[in-house]
Image: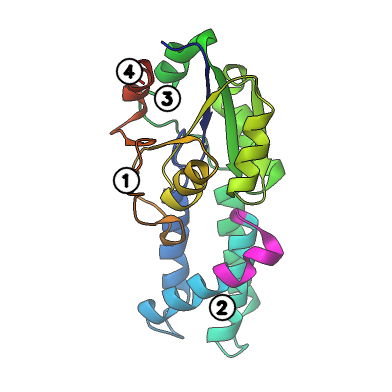
């Protein structure tokens, strides 16, 4: 294995499950609001609120919960009862307290990379919650550095990778929009690990005409990929 790599990992839906809890809450939210609006229109209104509120609340469960409350008030014309608001808050708390579920072969992958690479975590979202999830995951000791950022841009990747004394860097994640495209734009490699559930906001077309893009089925394939580069 080449000894001159920095390998960065996304966290949510790359190392552990995340989107499935959002989907479950959206299903409960749809049932809760069924008397006010049809499911398709509700989904559109919630998605619009989420994107509109990213600049105010950032990524994560807390912002999502506030967006659900805002959407409930809007689609009900302000008639949503306090009991329903309380139910939405309970959804948010349950999401925040859900146990971490590691994805397949995560620990094997990190152990295989071992001391021969710099391994860092680059994730976006709520600072406290991301720190809590990392602690609960039991993966913290594998990482040489942890970066929790508000957004993943080429400039953010350039700044993070510039701190490492390695000539080559790779970002590994399930989001084409946040993990792959900006990392490649920053001069790094991007390795896409698809997840069955990915937020529409994180979807994008794969980059064309670049040898620095790769796709693997699961993290168990990553050490062999790196060894061949």
Earlier in the chain: of badge 3 and badge 4, it is 3
Residue 221 percent coordinates (x, y) = 31, 23
Q: Is residue 174 left or right of residue 144?
A: left
* Quadrant in the rendering for residue 37: bottom left
31, above or below 125, in the image? below
> What residue did someone put label 1 on?
209
* Comes first in the chain, label 2 or label 3: 2
Cα separation, mark 2 vs mark 4, equals: 51 Å
Q: Which residue is mark 3?
A: 106
The answer to whether the residues at label 3 and label 4 have Cβ atoms under 8 Å apart is: no
Picture quadrant where residue 145 is located: top right
- Looking at the magenta stretch, what is its main secondary structure? helix
Q: Which residue is mark 4?
A: 228
Quadrant (top left/top right/bottom left/bottom right) for the N terminus: top left
Q: Which residue is mark 2?
A: 72
Q: Is residue 70 magenta?
A: no
């Amino acid at each position: 294995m080449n000894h001159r790599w920095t390998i960065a990992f996304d966290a949510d839906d790359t190392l552990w499950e995340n989107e499935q809890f959002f989907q479950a809450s959206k299903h409960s939210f749809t049932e809760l609001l069924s008397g006010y609006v049809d499911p398709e229109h509700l989904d559109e209104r919630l998605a619009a609120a989420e994107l509109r509120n990213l600049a105010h609340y950032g990524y994560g469960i807390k912002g999502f919960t506030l967006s659900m409350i805002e959407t409930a008030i809007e689609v009900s014309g302000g008639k949503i009862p306090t009991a329903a608001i309380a139910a939405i808050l309970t959804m948010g708390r349950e999401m925040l307290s859900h146990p971490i579920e590691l994805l397949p072969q995560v620990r094997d992958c990190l152990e295989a990379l071992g001391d021969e690479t710099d391994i860092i975590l680059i994730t976006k979202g709520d600072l406290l919650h991301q720190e809590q999830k990392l602690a609960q995951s039991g993966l913290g000791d594998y990482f040489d550095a942890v970066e929790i950022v508000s957004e993943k841009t080429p400039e953010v990747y350039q700044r993070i990778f510039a701190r490492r004394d390695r000539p080559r860097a790779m970002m590994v994640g399930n989001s084409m929009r946040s993990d792959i495209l900006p990392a490649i734009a920053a001069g790094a490699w991007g390795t896409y690990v698809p997840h069955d559930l990915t937020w529409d906001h994180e979807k994008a077309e794969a980059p064309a005409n670049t040898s620095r893009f790769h796709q693997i089925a699961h993290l168990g394939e990553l050490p062999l990929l790196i060894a061949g580069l």
